[in-house]
Amino acid sequence: MQARTQSPYDAGLRDHQAEAELEAYLCAHRKTGIVLQRAYPPTSFPRVRSRLGGLPQLPQAFEWPIGVSYGKSAPMHFLAQIDCAELPRVESMMPTQGMLFFFAVNDEEQIWDTDAPQERVRVLYALDVPADQPERQAPEQLRPIRDVNAANSPYTEPGWLLPGETGPRLHVQWPLVARQIETWPYDMPKSEGRCMPDVAAYHQRWSELSLGAAVAATGLMPNSDAVFRWERPLSQDWKFPAQWLRYQYDFPQVGIMIERLARLVSNARSKQTRHFAADRDVLDWVERAGRIGLDNTPDEATREAFRNWIIEQIGDEHKGTTLTDAKMGKVFTSGLLASVAYVAGSPDAARLIPLPLYNDLEGEHLPYEESYRKHADGRRYCARPRVHRMLGHVPLLQRAMPDIEGEPVCLLQLAWDPAIDLRFGDCGQATFWISREDLAARNFDRVAAVVESN
């Protein structure tokens, strides 16, 4: 007979008084914050002005912020703009109109919490930004994100860069919808005249509540069991579905798919052969996609030829430049995700990708970090939220806080978002902080930020 495992769902082992005290403690420290939901798919984008990346609708009265990177002057990268009129009213000190623009020197080290924060991050606030305000073009001196310059290997991010190419200078543009979310402090605050809960019980309950709050705020459920028809499932007896691909007569639906998939095939070859250079057939497809137009539909003959070329790349492991079935499955996923990230900034191209394909990739865009670990009683951890947010209590991965004079308020927290190549540290996050006093005075000159790794 197996030993009984303690479980919170076993009525005979539960301490109902301790649970009630824990719930009362959590309730006493709950705060309402804002989740910034990245709408999906690109064909259903809402008409909002809050967004990640792209180019800012920065009024002409404002200069593009200049910072310091490795001791030299450098234009900052644009991260996000938030239309305050679109925010739920959860904080009386927040502006109810105007636009917040978030910039940072997003170089390789991402060290933003220096003695002079304005050398690394800047938040600009414009009280009046007309709906038709044109986007500000980036300075010519803007460096590639994370200093990806003349990449010399296929291990560089983003994964579709070919050796010798510089990385993109602009982050992927994606609209954000602001919704209310309930939050609780990760570190237990001390309470006068109240017994402190058990630390392990508190953190487990915090994890459960935080996940539930994210589901309630976004309406999105974790989907850890999602599988792609073109990727190998748990079964070892599997081949890439070449016959299925041959009958996808409308694939690739847009030129960017050819371009991104060809690049990723090239890098997968290079990792296998250690020959870090693009082969002629890859360059031919990249150039052909450019002639077609990355936002345009290839003709039928081109689509058929490209499908056949993809299938021809599959072969036995360690034989020349061919890829295994499993590797091609991973390349296919990466290529489609990179294509969706591109079309997010091109409504015409976004409409060319069929809805079933967007549905297949939805799991990669969910704001959760899936987990296959298990509790001691055998239950699996479902997931933890990985959301962009403002205000309320926010998780601190390394308990890192910049030096803020006064009560700190989270002005913005951007999460690691691999589906659109938004990366901070090692699967980490970037958090912008302001004092409550400065927020009330609309003084954003002293905003400080820190990047934490997971």
Image (spheres, rainbow, N blue to C red):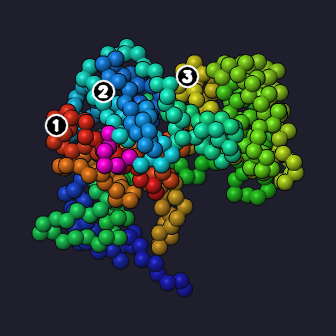
Q: Which residue is mark 2?
A: 99
Q: How many marks?
A: 3
Compare marks 1 and 3 and give the one earlier in the sequence: 3
Q: Residue at x 58, y 52 (%)?
A: 225
From this viewpoint, which residue is outermost toward the left? 193
The magenta segment = 112-118
Q: Which mark is residue 346?
A: 3
Rendered location of residue 9, percent (x, y): 39, 69
Compare marks 1 and 2 and give the one earlier in the sequence: 2
CA gap between label 1 and label 3 equals: 38 Å
Q: Nearer the viewer, residue 16 or 25?
A: 25
Rendered location of residue 110, percent (x, y): 45, 47
The kind of residue on which mark 2 rests is Met
Q: Which residue is mark 1?
A: 440
- Callout 1: 10 Å neighbours few (<14), some, many (20+)? few
CA gap between label 2 and label 3 equals: 23 Å
Q: Nearer the viewer, residue 205 or 160?
A: 160
The kind of residue on which mark 3 rests is Ser
Left or right of residue 110: residue 273:
right
Q: Nearer the viewer, residue 69 or 283?
A: 69
From this viewpoint, which residue is outermost toward the top? 132
The kind of residue on which mark 1 rests is Ala
- Callout 2: 10 Å neighbours few (<14), some, many (20+)? many
Q: Residue at x 17, y 49 (%)?
A: 406
> From where the camera sits, is residue 20 visible?
no
- Is 4 situated above or below 412? below
Query: Which is more foreground, mark 2 or mark 3?
Result: 2
Left or right of residue 209: residue 166:
right
Q: Nearer the viewer, residue 78 or 310?
A: 78
Q: Is residue 114 magenta?
A: yes
